[in-house]
Amino acid sequence: MGSNRLFAAVRDALVVTLAMAVVACIFNAVRKGGIPFVQETEYQILVPCPEPIGEVEGLDAADSKLDHDKYIFVDARPESEFMQWHLDEARNVVFDFLEETPSETINDLAKQRARGLIVYGDGQDPDSGRELAREIAGRGIKNVFYIEGGAPALWQVRGGSPGQGPGGRTAE
């Protein structure tokens, strides 16, 4: 008796599947621009993403450019890390490996008329600062640099720590 129920369930499932397939084929035939049963042209499944990547130069954390007030400093780390420690004059532009930096942010940086941008990130591999610098340079801004080693390298050179600003001052 159990095998009869199983057979009936399988039979009913096949009947419903066949009926739905017939309905789908009829609907597809009637529909304008229906989906072809056999693909006529080749699908392009691997499409390269347009990535605006520019060339940037790495700077040592002790480079003299860091003491020049004509550069804009950009911290590419998450806001929580930025709040723990950052250069006093740095702006926080969080770099996301999956999302493009908003055009408004890039345009705002370009309007500053600085000599250039110096970006620092987490110092990891890949470094968020280097990647943000490459994105900014790829979007048309000239004289973009990044700090090799990121914020950890700056902490060592500036004598701070993640909970303190440059020179031992607590970040605000």
Image: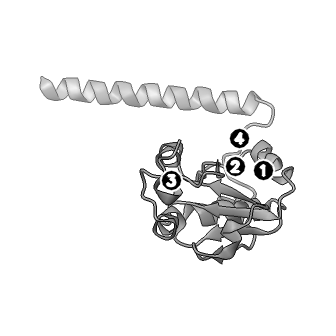
Q: Which of marks 2 and 4 precedes in the sequence?
A: 4
The kind of residue tagged 4 is: Ile
What residue would you read off at disc 1? 106
Q: Which of marks 3 and 4 precedes in the sequence?
A: 4
Tell which tag, 4 or 2, sits nearer the viewer: 2
- The x and y percentages for residue 112 are 84, 51
Q: CA distance from mark 3 to mark 1?
A: 26 Å
What residue would you read off at disc 3? 165
Which quadrant is the N terminus positioned in?
top left
Q: Which element type, helix, strand or loop, lies under badge 4?
A: loop
In this picture, residue 29 sits left or right of residue 84 = right
Tell which tag, 2 or 3, sits nearer the viewer: 3
CA neighbours of label 1 inside 10 A, class few (<14), some (14 to 19), many (20+): some
In this picture, residue 93 sits left or right of residue 153 = right
Q: Which element type, helix, strand or loop, lies under badge 2?
A: loop
* Residue at horizontal 37 percent and vertical 28 percent from the top: 13
Picture quadrant where residue 30 is located = top right
Residue 46 visible to the viewer:
no
The kind of residue tagged 2 is: Thr
Tell which tag, 1 or 4, sits nearer the viewer: 1
The kind of residue tagged 3 is: Gly
Q: Nearer the viewer, residue 87 or 135?
A: 87
1 and 2 marks in contact (CB < 8 Å): yes
Check residue 35 in the rendering and tell me which mark sits there, or answer none. 4
Q: Relative to 35, say whether 57 is above or below.
A: below
Check residue 101 in the rendering and tell me which mark sits there, or answer none. 2
Q: Which of marks 1 and 3 precedes in the sequence?
A: 1
Tell which tag, 1 or 2, sits nearer the viewer: 1
Q: Relative to 26, say whether 84 is above or below.
A: below
